Amino acid sequence: MNNLFEQIKDDFPVLINNPKLVYLDSGASSLKLKSVIDKQTEYYTKYGVNIHRGVYALSHQATEEYEETRNVVARFINARPEEIVYTKGTTNSLNMVATSYGFKHLLAEDEIIVSELEHHSSILPWQNVARQKGCIIKYIELNHEGRITIENFKKVLSKKTKVVALTYVSNVMGYITPIKEIISLAHEVGAIVIVDAAQAAPHIKIDVKEMDADFLAFSAHKMLGPTGFGILYGKYHLLEKLEPVEFGGDMNDEVDLYEATYREVPYKFEAGTPPIAEAIAFKEAIYYLEKLTMNHVHEHEVQLINYAIPKLLTLPNLEIYNPTTDTGIIAFNLHGIHPHDVASFLDEEGIALRAGHHCAQLITKWLGCSGTLRATFYIYNTKQDVDRFVLALKKAIDFFGGWD
């Protein structure tokens, strides 16, 4: 399996142009494949026209390429093409569901279950719905590791539960939520489940039919693809019930003076000219991941984590908050040093990682700190990257020294 990953760095222009870079910020955004970049260039230079509306050959070609991505995404997560809605990203997708489903179907005193592991885009839309509709937000108590457990989920689940909105993989702790079991329990009380898969889709195999997800969202830019493009999966019968939240060209069917009808799913949710180049290019990222296989992607990350964590634990005054992480995410701090200072020092050593609350302030507060350092490993990282990372941290400890 390791042979699959030996030459991967050569497929990423950023790494070719920055040969000394150790990129450990894939949790924020992954690096982009050359094939993705080339596909965008191909669109702009060979058939860079609008889709769906043109009756000429170039428009037809662009439309075919654009719609083929829908088929590829559907296959990737085991969905039907008509259940794949193009969006601007995970945040846009999750807001769409909360706005359309939440305001129409939820009533005062209905309960919404979330967790302190959530990215802001998974919780703020439901806070907004709850505030305006009089709903009640309930939090799953995290266990001593900071994990969501079935036992604690059952404690907050009730007949009043109408929505469960949870992360599949925490963007700070790297834990995999037992989402399939949670969905099954939620469905027993008639609740729908919205899955934030932004950190899951790039790293583990997703099968929306097997897990029985109602809605699931992820972004292209975190999985080797372009920015400004994302996916919302929804069960077809639920998508049919949703009202569009954006109106304009290409989403309508018949328009009269005082009313209009809309196109079928998924097109009624895709108003205006979309990010055509990004949509067309995204399938190249999926082809690449499919060639590697998601099982191998996850296995590679776990190998790197298992190699890195024992080395990090030997360093003085370093605390790892998630030593049992399930994916390529390590959240940590050096005691007495602000994470931003450490990140700036590491940057001088060619190590790029994230410092702060990572748009997940609730779990940061749960950890009892103002922010963390976050190293996220992905397919283009190696054990040599780990060694350089650890060495740079040793230098940082020596440089800052002097704390208790």
Image: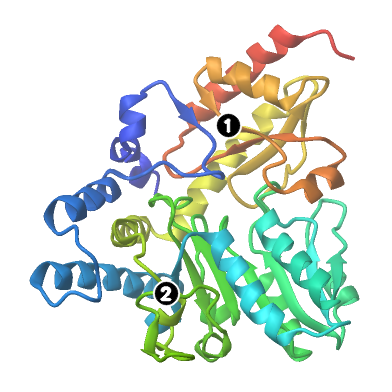
The residue labelled by disc 2 is 248
Residue 100 is tagged as none
Q: Residue at x 48, y 90 (%)?
A: 258
- For numbered disc 2, what is the local secondary structure? loop
Rendered image quadrant of residue 49: bottom left
* Dot placed on the residue nearer the N-terminal end, 1 or 2: 2
Above or below — where is 154 with respect to 41?
Answer: below
Rendered image quadrant of residue 241: bottom right
Foreground pick, 105 / 79: 105
Examine the rendering and report whether any part of residue 119 can be seen: no
| Identity, as a three-letter code, of the amino acid under mark 1 | Leu
Q: Position of residue 353 (x, y in %)?
A: 58, 31
Residue 353 is tagged as 1
Give the left or right position of residue 383, taking residue 256 as reference.
Answer: right
Foreground pick, 130 / 394: 130
Q: Position of residue 394 (x, y in %)?
A: 66, 15
